[in-house]
């Protein structure tokens, strides 16, 4: 019988803490356990500490997970709660994604200071975004805009927008909803025109392989539809060697036993892109994503990817 609190690792930003609290609350409800049986352990990651450079310049997605994973492997944490889109496709030996919470809205939120919609921004307006995918999609739709790298926690980016450092920015709508700020966006972008990052809007839980005690703890809160959809999207990403250096978009939707996937790859300047759609059974989710990745890579040709290096 568990006597010590389960230790839940998380980044220390307000959004990360809200996500860890959601995971804790779902575990409490699933097992009838009191709050004192769970300890939320905030850790500072390199990705949080280094804010003056693009992620691609300092190492990519793993910068948000390395410290948490080291503590998982050493036994200092029982589980780690992450934004799924921040997770590298290759995890450290001995760790795996063991559960996904029910997915929030996957769409990107546009927050405009000088216009309420992306398409209505004045010529030459400045848009801030740290995401290469968002930067490429903005340039695809509005090549006249000036797009700058713009990092920081949600609250920091909104403050910079209010101060007039940029005319607009984009954030994941899921994060704004989890922070209790669903009214902040001035436009929600249609995924068919502005597809989200793979795994956007999904919270995942990482734990040790073959830890039966933790697997049993997490099993009741794992959302199967989210697990299958995100497994497909991560399969697509892995096949394309996706990282913070690469503009890749894609999303899957499970409808009953069937899954539909839409993917897109772009050059960083948004001038060229390829799209793909695939469908199949949810039980084949990862393979569907991998097949879509292989087919879009072949269709684009090796020359297309030269701009990614």
Image (tube, rainbow, N blue to C red):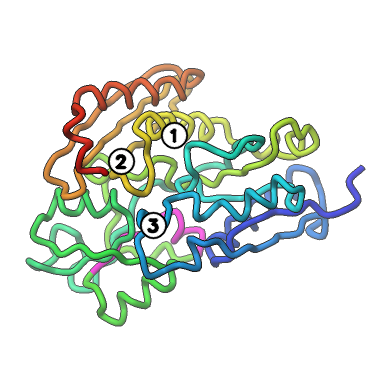
Relative to 118, is 292 on the left or the right? Answer: right
Q: Magenta residues? A: 168-179
Relative to 285, is 271 on the left or the right? Answer: left
Q: Quadrant of the C terminus?
A: top left
Secondary structure of the residue carrying numbered label 2? strand
**Picture coordinates of residue 165, whole percent (x, y):** 26, 77
Q: Nearer the viewer, residue 59 or 14?
A: 59
**Picture coordinates of residue 13, whole percent (x, y):** 54, 66
Q: From the viewer's perspective, is the residue at label 1 or at label 3 nearer? A: 3
Residue name at image x 76 percent, y 39 percent = 214
**Picture coordinates of residue 90, whole percent (x, y):** 51, 36
Residue name at image x 78 percent, y 58 percent = 35
Relative to 187, is 204 on the left or the right? Answer: right
> Which residue is the site of mark 1?
234
Q: Quadrant of the N terminus?
A: top right
> Which residue is the site of mark 3?
55
- Sequence-wise, the earlier of marks 3 and 2 is 3
Between the C-alphas of marks 1 and 2, the distance is: 11 Å
Residue 252 badge: none
- Sequence-wise, the earlier of marks 1 and 3 is 3
Between the C-alphas of marks 1 and 3, the distance is: 19 Å
> Which residue is the site of mark 2?
248
Q: Quadrant of residue 288?
A: top left
Residue name at image x 19 percent, y 59 percent = 118
Residue 307 to residue 234: above or below: below
Between the C-alphas of marks 3 and 2, the distance is: 15 Å
Is residue 16 rendered magenta in the image? no
Secondary structure of the residue carrying numbered label 1? helix
Residue 4 to residue 208: above or below: below
State the residue lying farthest toward the bottom.
Answer: 163
């Amino acid at each position: 019988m568990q006597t010590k609190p389960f230790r839940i690792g998380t980044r220390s930003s307000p959004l990360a803490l809200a996500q860890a609290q959601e995971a804790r609350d779902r575990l409490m409800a699933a097992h009838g356990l009191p709050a004192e049986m769970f300890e939320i352990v905030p850790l500072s990651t390199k990705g949080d500490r280094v804010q003056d450079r693009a992620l691609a310049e300092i190492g990519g997605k793993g910068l948000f997970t390395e410290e948490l994973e080291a503590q998982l492997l050493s036994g200092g944490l029982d589980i780690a709660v992450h934004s799924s889109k921040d997770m590298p496709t290759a995890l450290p030996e001995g760790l795996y994604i063991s559960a996904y919470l029910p997915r929030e809205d996957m769409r990107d939120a546009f927050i405009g200071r000088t216009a309420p919609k992306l398409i209505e921004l004045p010529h030459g307006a400045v848009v801030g975004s740290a995401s290469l995918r968002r930067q490429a999609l903005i340039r695809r739709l509005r090549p006249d805009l000036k797009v700058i790298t713009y990092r920081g926690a949600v609250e920091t980016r909104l403050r910079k927008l209010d101060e007039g450092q940029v005319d607009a920015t984009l954030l994941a709508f899921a994060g704004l909803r989890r922070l209790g700020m669903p009214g902040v966006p001035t436009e929600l972008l249609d995924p068919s025109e502005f597809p989200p990052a793979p795994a956007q809007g999904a919270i995942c839980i990482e734990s040790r392989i073959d830890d039966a005690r933790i697997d049993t703890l997490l099993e009741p809160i794992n959302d199967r539809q989210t697990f299958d959809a995100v497994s497909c999207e991560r399969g697509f990403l892995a096949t394309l060697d996706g990282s913070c250096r690469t503009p890749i978009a894609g999303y899957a939707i499970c409808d009953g036993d069937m899954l539909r996937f839409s993917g897109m790859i772009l050059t960083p300047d948004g001038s060229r892109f390829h799209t793909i759609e695939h469908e199949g059974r949810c039980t084949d989710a990862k393979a569907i994503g991998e097949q879509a990745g292989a087919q879009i890579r072949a269709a684009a040709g090796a020359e297309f990817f030269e701009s990614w290096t």
